[in-house]
Amino acid sequence: MGAITAVVTKEEQDTANAILTMIKELAHRGKVAYGIATAKEQTLANSIEKLCPEKLRSNIGLGYVFSKTLPTDAPLLIKTDNFTFVFEGRTHPPININEKLQPNPQKTAEGIIKNCDGAYVFAIATPDVLIVGRDTLGLAPLYFAKNKSSIAFASERKALWKLGLKTAESFPPGNIATIKSQSFSFKPVKTVKQPKVKPLDMKFAAEKLQRLLLQSVKVRVSDVKEVAVAFSGGLDSGTVAFLAKKCMVNVELITVSLENMPETSHAEDAAKALALPIHTRTISVNDVEKTLPKVLWLIEDPDPVQASIALPLFWTAEHAKKHGFKVLLSGQGADELFGGYHRYLSIYAEKSPEELQKTLFRDVARCYETNFQRDSHACAFHQVELRLPFADFRVVNFALSLPLSLKIDSSADLLRKRVLRQAAENMHVPQLIVCKTKKAVQYATGITKTLQTLAKRENLNTSDYVRKVFQKIYPDVKTE
């Protein structure tokens, strides 16, 4: 939920001012503490103004924006005898990250990624090498960009753009990058791969999935007494809410939509069936128009689909914070893992089940670009930590190993996600949740239709309207 930055200059130039510039762009992700460091020195303060970058002189620099979710959270900007280490994020289950530090920085980086599930990024600065890493699934956002004189990394692209680095790319999950003044390379450590598909029957698969999901939710609520759930009343969020309640934490549900949307009534009925309190946030066309620039600034993407998904999550996180929740659970990732999207039926019918199996894997592997980064940005602004039980490495690996027939039984399968529905039914999740058909959040909330209405007011299509708003915020960023 906080942020890191890192810069290496190819010439012997100081990086402190560049790091300070980037921290200022990312200050909204923390508001508790800020740090700048080299391999030998560091400065940490409770405000950006109190930092002393002039004392740090090196061509390798680190930046840190710290956000506090739990009372026990403390800044992880650590100086060892051999290097300086900065870590941002959360491991599941929680670990003492200091115990993972070894004298060898390369082994430290590889060991963290191999052994730690969760949402995190980190960087290690030695006098002549920078090492940067990202969690296996890419749940914590991280980007990089380079030009002839420098290479930089940051938790949001806007920090890179501020340095004039216009081509910012997503850092590959489960990798470490090793950067010296004249070289830059990635090394995969633990990444998402397509396992061998196992010929399992529905009974065995559903029962194992139950156990894995319960374990995933349990570790993601083990350090809190209460959580909010981004709730639609559908299978994914309904299963997460059910399991969170089973883990004996206080659970409250939050749903967001425009007025008179039928999905809102369903969410309220589903909450009643779960015997959980629900907060309904009703938004207007004016709310969408007013909030769109802020959300585009956060997600850094002019795609109207991305914006229409980020908007309701932005309000959900805002509402969670209003009611005192610091952790928000979501069912994000289940549709890619279990074949939830309607478009998968077309691939099944027009191509082949084998091609659909490949598509599901590609979609899961790319979730960090299509979903996780966007969602993190939308929640971090409100200092709400997003946790995703379906994005657990063991859950992901098991789901990818399942035969397609346990997810989609034909090209006419309107329900899909068969094994997840069976697991939910086994656990006695209410039937109106188990049997709920998939409706994408941008349609269920009415956001897509509202963006179309706003675009028509200016005689534009939705894509051009969103791009126009985006270019007012980021005039120097090229859009397609």
Image (cartoon, grey):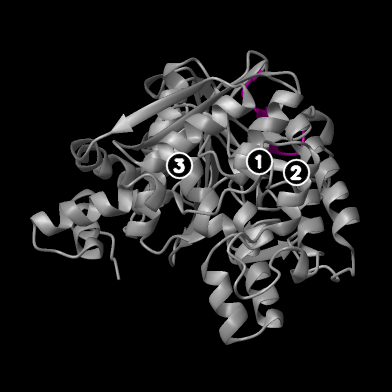
Segment colored magenta: 73-86
Q: How many marks?
A: 3
Residue identifier under label 2: 425
Q: Say which element carries label 1.
A: helix
67 left or right of 177? left
Horizontal and vertical percent position of residue 100: 82, 36
Secondary structure at numbered mark 3: helix
Residue 223 lies, with reference to residue 237, above or below; the image says above
Distance (Cα) linking label 1 and label 3: 33 Å
Q: Amino acid at mark 1?
A: Gln
Q: Is residue 475 magenta?
A: no
Residue at 35% x, 51% y is: 307
Q: Where 295 falls versus 455 (above or below)?
A: above
Labelled pair 1, 2 in contact (Cβ < 8 Å): yes
Left or right: residue 285 versus residue 193 is left
User: Residue tagged by mark 1?
Assistant: 431
Q: Say whether disc 1 or disc 3 marks the residue closer to the N-terminus.
A: 3
In the rendered view, would you say 177 is above or below 373? below
Alpha carbons under labels 1 and 2: distance apart: 7 Å
Mark nearer the N terminus (2 vs 3): 3
Q: Nearer the viewer, residue 358 or 58?
A: 358
Q: Residue at x 29, y 36 (%)?
A: 259
Q: Nearer the viewer, residue 318 or 66?
A: 318
Tag 3 residue: 377
**Residue 145's mark?**
none
